[in-house]
Structure formats: C-alpha cells, structure tokens
Image (spheres, rainbow, N blue to C red):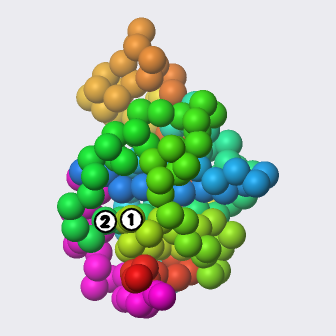
Amino acid sequence: MKQYIDVWEYAPQIMKAMEQGILMTTQADGETDTMTIGWGMLGREWYKPIFIAYVRQSRHTKSLVDKNPEFTINVPLEAIDKNIIAVCGTKSGRDMDKIRELGLTTVPGETVSVPGIAQLPLTLECKVVYRNDQFLEDIPEESRLRFYKPGTANDGDYHTAYYGEITAAYILQD
C-alpha cells in the first residue's frame, strides 16, 4: 500500500536523511541496482518538482541510468540498519546483487520502471529530464582537492548530475 505525499512537506526529512545516506535505485537490462548517495538537491525547475542526484562517472549506477533514464530515491523514515547504507555505498553492483545480498524488498514503481525499496519507505519516482557532466575547470579548487584529489582513486572521476522530474511521491506501507 502507498500513502501519497506532498514532497515539499517531506523536504526537510529527505534532506536531513541524506546526511546519513539515502539510496538511489536504477534498473536496466533486467538488472536492478541501488547505491548510497549523500549528495542531492530537491527543488523546482521548469515548473516541475526535481530531485538532482549526483553519480560518479565510474559507478555502475551511471551505466544503468544512462540506459534507462529513470530512478527512485529511497529514504528511511526512522533508524535504518547502517549496514544497508555501508554496503550500498562501498560495493559495486557490477560485483554483487546488493538487493538480494541485503535481503531488501523491492516494490514496483507506478510511473517509472524502477522499484522502490520497502526498508526505505519514502519513495520518489523520477524521470531524467536533463543531465550535466561536471568538468574540472568548473569545480572550485577547494572542492577539487577535497573530492577529486590528484593521485587518488577519485582523480578524474567526476559526477554527472541527473535532474529527475518527480513523477510520484509516497510512503510504502505494510
């Protein structure tokens, strides 16, 4: 069962939860994957409610959302097993089925082909309406040194911003 919500009423909860990590779920070619995100924006563009998710170029999630430009944002409403956030933030869907390994329950989307996740019941269904790659020369030096430090694994592994029009917002209920 789904309780439909006004995304703006829940905006503070969504943004606060992002500090600890929320999930972005994607699906393409019969594969569903989810990853932890800590960067995102909730706003309005072109008179549409938008969630902007930032995904590194190297991530498996990027390959899936590029094939199927839809995603869900999955937000806990109460304390969540930190192992879910840890595994989804450190393991790649190229190497393991995180949803199966973690025992997560998927719930079919209504306006997108990507499911929500019952354990993180606040769900935003999003269709990509725009994407923008980051470029080194446009990133402030302080941020370049902190998040893309030369000589580290993140050197040159910039983000793509996916602007997802929020087409449905609800809380999954038993």
Q: Which residue is mark 1?
A: 119
Question: x and y percent of residue 86 in the render?
Answer: 34, 40
Q: Nearer the viewer, residue 113 or 136?
A: 113
Q: Nearer the viewer, residue 81 or 44?
A: 81
Q: Which residue is mark 2?
A: 76
> Residue at the top extreme?
151
Q: Amino acid at mark 2?
A: Pro
Q: Residue at x 40, y 14 (%)?
A: 152
Q: Secondary structure at mark 1?
A: loop
Question: x and y percent of residue 12 in the render?
Answer: 22, 72
Quadrant in which the C terminus is drawn = bottom left
Q: Of circles 2 and 1, which is in front? A: 1
Q: Residue at x 42, y 55 (%)?
A: 23
Q: Amino acid at mark 1?
A: Gln
Write down the region rendered in magenta. Answer: 1-19
When asked about the image quadrant of residue 27, the answer is: bottom right
